[in-house]
Image (cartoon, rainbow, N blue to C red):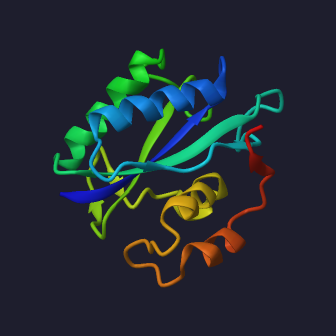
């Protein structure tokens, strides 16, 4: 068993409700050690100017599944929420689930890279991650989350109201 961290995001439909429903599903599927951050409202990053705000959060739980199996489970949940398998990058979505870290493991395969290759630049992931794991450090990164958040590109982020 290892602790895994999954980032959740949505900006279609009722984004906060999509994230809450996905959290509930993950809590049921992976109850051991499950915890979740607050939901944040964040401006879209690298998307069209008319894209709507995202609801973002991070969850943590214990899992003994092989990481690529866990990734497949996350992709199946995205599909259940209506996300097409061949979605484009930086497009609006009902649900986006990213496996961002798995304990102190590093991995680089065609299907999965851990830690997530863009996580250090994503304040919308780092901030909620700090809510649930303030002492967490990514493998190979000396700085803690508070320093990484300060270094991440500026972003409008606030608790979802």
Question: Which residue lies at the image location 47% right of the left edge and 18% below the top edge?
Answer: 81
How many numbered marks appear?
A: 0
Q: Is residue 59 left or right of residue 94?
A: left
Question: Which residue lies at the image location 65% right of the left edge and 21% below the top edge?
Answer: 12
Residue 147: quarter of image: bottom right
Residue 132 lies, in percent from the top left, at 50, 60
Q: In this orientation, does residue 153 appear?
A: yes
Q: Is residue 85 left or right of residue 1?
A: right
Q: Is residue 12 left or right of residue 36?
A: right
Residue 151 lies, in percent from the top left, at 69, 73
Q: In what quadrant of the picture does the C terminus appear?
A: top right
Residue 139 lies, in percent from the top left, at 37, 74
Question: Which residue lies at the image location 61% right of the left edge and 48% below the top edge?
Answer: 38
Q: In this orientation, does residue 85 appear?
A: no
Above or below residue 17? Residue 104 is below
Residue 1 lies, in percent from the top left, at 17, 57
């Amino acid at each position: 068993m290892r602790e895994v961290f999954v980032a959740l995001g949505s900006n279609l439909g009722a984004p906060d409700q999509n994230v809450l429903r996905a959290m509930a599903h993950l809590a049921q599927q992976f109850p051991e050690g499950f915890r979740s951050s607050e939901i944040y409202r964040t401006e879209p990053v690298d998307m069209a100017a008319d894209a709507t705000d995202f609801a973002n959060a991070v969850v943590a739980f214990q899992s003994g599944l092989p990481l690529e199996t866990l990734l497949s489970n996350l992709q199946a949940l995205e599909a259940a929420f209506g996300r097409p398998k061949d979605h484009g990058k930086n497009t609006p979505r009902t649900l986006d689930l990213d496996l961002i870290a798995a304990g102190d493991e590093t991995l680089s395969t065609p299907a999965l890279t851990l830690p997530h290759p863009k996580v250090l630049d994503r304040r919308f992931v780092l901030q909620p991650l700090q809510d649930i794991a303030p002492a967490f450090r990514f493998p190979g990164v000396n700085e803690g989350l508070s320093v990484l958040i300060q270094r991440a590109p500026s972003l409008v982020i606030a608790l979802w109201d």
